[in-house]
Image (cartoon, grey):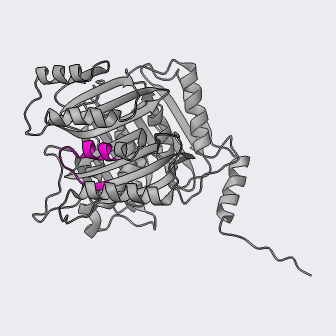
Amino acid sequence: MGVIHTYDSDSDDDYETFVLKMNPPRVVVDNESCNNATIIKVDSCTNKNGMLLEVVQVLIDLNLIITKGYITQDGGWFMDVFSVTDRDGHKLSDQVTIDKVESHIRKSLGADTSYVPSKRRSVDVATSTNYTVIELTGNDRPGLLSEVSAVLSDLNCNLIHVEIWTHNTRVAAVLHLTDQSTNSPITDVERNSKIEQRLKNVLKGGSDLSRGAKAGVSVGCTKSMQRRLHELMNDDGDFEIDSQGVAGGKSGGPTVMITNWNDKDYSVVTIRCKDRPKLLFDTLCSLTDMRYVIFHGNVAIEGPEAYQEFYIRDVNGSRVKDEDRERVMHWLKAAIERRVSEGLKLELSTKDRAGLLKEVTRIFREHSLTVTRAEISSEEGEAISTFYVRDRSGDIVEQRRIETIREELKESVLRVEGQDGQAGKSTKRSPMNFLFGELFRAMSFLPGL
């Protein structure tokens, strides 16, 4: 009698597990080849959609700056080279950080662990059930964060991590919280439903919105906050074009061009904009959400400007269709602009306590400051928060107003940075010209760094 073999829906992942065990991805951290940057080389005989984003997420999670990169992932294999520095523009000298780079990338690609990421995910992190997750989207308005934090405080919720983005009149937020009395996740269905409804009412603000407010509550998390914020903003349509055919966003923003390279059957995406940390991660999130695959690419800093060039097809192997070109360009611009916040950057450090965010945002609100972006975390009794704020009327925030706020915050440490909202300074680097087509003609996809 013959043997009948049956296969389940996870057979592709089982095969990938086998291949990775026999030929694990290689990660090389090279501190010798370049004088002003550490070179990170990653290659694997197994390529899957989202692998590039996973590698870049590891680098940004370790607070590294990508100054240059060459991407090649064609024909079922994956090979990328990145030049990175720390936040101060120096090569990596700390062996602990170097070891983390190598081990975290290997694990993200399925090496050194029995768990292999599914092809159906993009950039997932280890699921946590230590907190309740709240996701919000809606119309942005002054004082919204203050109202949200007040509601959660009244409902006896303790905020652990919060990240909020605003763009093109829209707001998205991801909040991790616990029960104030037990420091455990809120699992009661009725209570979570009450939290959700109260937050929806706050987001609506008593008006009949053309685009409805959304609030969701769940336990645990499977994606990084920033990855999820991109998805929420994309789903909410912050990139949409208005009735005059103009995309919302900042004037003088990024330049995005898309051309079709008929000979090689690729669409070529080129991006030029002011350099900033995490820029590559943001553009990769956008392309991934639009279901485009990068086969080759260049990224680098040219003085204060960043340059990115990607050779892409959609997941079905097609180039960008003419009717989709404008939408893809606006989607990419929105992904770049979301993290750029005008106004003052305020860094607050203080002892954590119940209702802290409610108190801080109330003080901002009373001094006519509106929050455009925020990153808030609480760990081991310490609260460390970064707020990007601006005056509601658009005026410059006077120094005396900041001093008054500092006095009202009492024992908290408040640091202030700039009126232009730039989170960091760019390190100037020698200009580079990119002619990626020449690389194809020369059959050399990885020129020396």
Q: Residue furthest bottom?
A: 1
**Which quarter of the picture shows residue 240?**
bottom left
Quick one: 336 or 319, which is closer to the camera? 336
Query: Is residue 11 left or right of 409 when viewed as pictured?
Result: right
Percent position of residue 152, x then y: 36, 46
Quick one: 3 or 435, which is closer to the camera? 3
**Which quarter of the picture shows residue 409?**
top left
Percent position of residue 397, x then y: 12, 28
Quick one: 207 or 179, which is closer to the camera? 179
**Quadrant (top left, top right, bottom left, bottom right) of the C terminus:** top left
Query: Is residue 362 left or right of 190 when viewed as pictured?
Result: left
Does the magenta segment cover residue 348?
no
For image coordinates 17% across by 57% down, the residue present is 247
For image coordinates 22% across by 23% down, the residue present is 408
For image coordinates 28% across by 30% down, the residue present is 423
Q: Answer yes or no: is residue 292 visible.
A: no
**Quadrant (top left, top right, bottom left, bottom right) of the N terminus:** bottom right
For image coordinates 23% across by 64% down, the residue present is 211
Percent position of residue 262, x then y: 35, 63
Quick one: 337 or 320, which is closer to the camera? 337
Q: Answer yes or no: is residue 80 visible.
A: yes
Is 302 placed above or below 6 here? above
Query: Is residue 328 left or right of 46 when viewed as pictured?
Result: left
Give the magenta-colored segment's residue range.
137-151
Query: Is residue 8 left or right of 337 when viewed as pictured?
Result: right
